[in-house]
Every structure is written in C-alpha cells, then in structure tokens.
Image: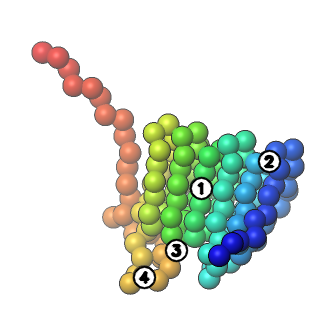
C-alpha cells in the first residue's frame, strides 16, 4: 500500500502548524508543530537538511536532521546518525543510531493492551542517559 507523501523541499520555509494523516518529509525549515491525525498511520521524516522548531506528534517518526521541540511517537521512533533533538522524547519503541543526540529527557510511554500510547507517561518510566567513564587502569 503506497502513501501520499508531502515534501517540504530544502529551500522552503513553513510558518505555522501542519496537520497530516499520511506521510510528511521535511528537507526545509518548519517553524510550527506537526500534528498527525490520532487514528492515522502517519509518518514524519525530518531529512538530513531538515529543521523543525516545534513539536512532533505522530505514530511513526524518523529524524535525520534537527528538531527543536518535544517529540511524541505513539508507535516507532528512529533517531539516525545525524539526528538531533533539543527537547523531550516520548516514545513507545525507539531506535537510536550511534551519533544521534538528544538534549532532553527520554520518556518511555507504555501502551495499554495494544491501544495507542497514553498521553502522559508515569514518572517511573523516565529513562536517564548518562555518559559512562572508561575504567581506570590500576
């Protein structure tokens, strides 16, 4: 099954919120929020040259570029090598490739019996990522 893909090209700049129900690929700049219809199978991709200032709320999200805002994925989130998120990441399932960066909290959101993820994660689901110091040689 193919999806209709909306492309925001490298030289485009969008000011304002965008509501989607299918696929959105961002290579340009968006200053606003990306909001997927709650019952859709929408996918948002922030390309390598893409930049978003705002939050993303979608079932599936792929980040190769930069996001300055919170990210809410109700199904699957992929942070690729050069992906950068400056904000909190709320996820059900996440892949994080070496080299990607998150300047914020990683918050795991549990699903309820296969239903969509809860909107507000419980505090006990907070994951903290800290660098590990190399072992000292004695």
Above or below residue 123? Residue 13 is: above
Distance, label 1 to label 3, CA atoms, is 20 Å
Give the residue displayed 59% in from the left and 55% down from the top: 62
Q: Look at mark 4 in the image and give the residue it sits on.
A: 114
What label does residue 28 carry, if any? 2
At a point 20% along the width and 20% down the height, the residue shown is: 136
The label nearer to you, 1 versus 3, is 1
Number of residues whose C-alpha sits closer than 10 Å to that of mark 1, classed few (under 14), some (14–19) or many (20 or more): many
User: Do the residues under discs 1 and 3 have CB atoms within 8 angstroms?
Assistant: no
Judge whether 41 appears above or below 53 on screen: below
Of label 2 and label 3, which has the lower sequence position? 2
Q: Residue at 79%, 63% (x, y): give it.
A: 6
Residue 137 got which mark? none
Q: Earlier in the sequence, mark 1 or mark 3?
A: 1
Using the image, tell me which numbered label, if any, was put on residue 119. 3
Among numbered discs 3 and 4, the one appearing first in the sequence: 4
User: Which quarter of the rendering shows the N terminus?
Assistant: bottom right
* Left or right of 25 on screen, residue 127: left
Q: Position of residue 12 (x, y in %)?
A: 87, 49
Q: Which mark is residue 62?
A: 1
Instruction: Give the distance between the C-alpha atoms of the residues marked 2 and 4, in whole angstroms.
Output: 35 Å
Separation of disc 2 and disc 3 at Cα?
29 Å
């Amino acid at each position: 099954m193919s999806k209709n893909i909306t492309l925001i090209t490298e030289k485009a700049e969008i000011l304002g919120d965008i509501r989607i129900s299918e696929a959105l690929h961002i290579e340009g700049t968006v200053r606003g929020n990306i909001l997927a219809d709650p019952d859709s199978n929408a996918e948002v991709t922030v390309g390598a040259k893409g930049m978003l200032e705002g939050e993303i709320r979608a079932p599936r999200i792929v980040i190769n570029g930069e996001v300055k805002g919170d990210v809410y994925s109700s199904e699957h989130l992929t942070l690729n090598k050069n992906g950068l998120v400056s904000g909190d990441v709320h996820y059900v399932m996440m892949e994080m490739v070496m080299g990607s960066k998150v300047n914020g909290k990683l918050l795991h959101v549990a699903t309820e019996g296969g239903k969509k993820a809860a909107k507000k994660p419980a505090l006990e689901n907070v994951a903290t990522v800290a660098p590990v110091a190399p072992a000292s040689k004695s």
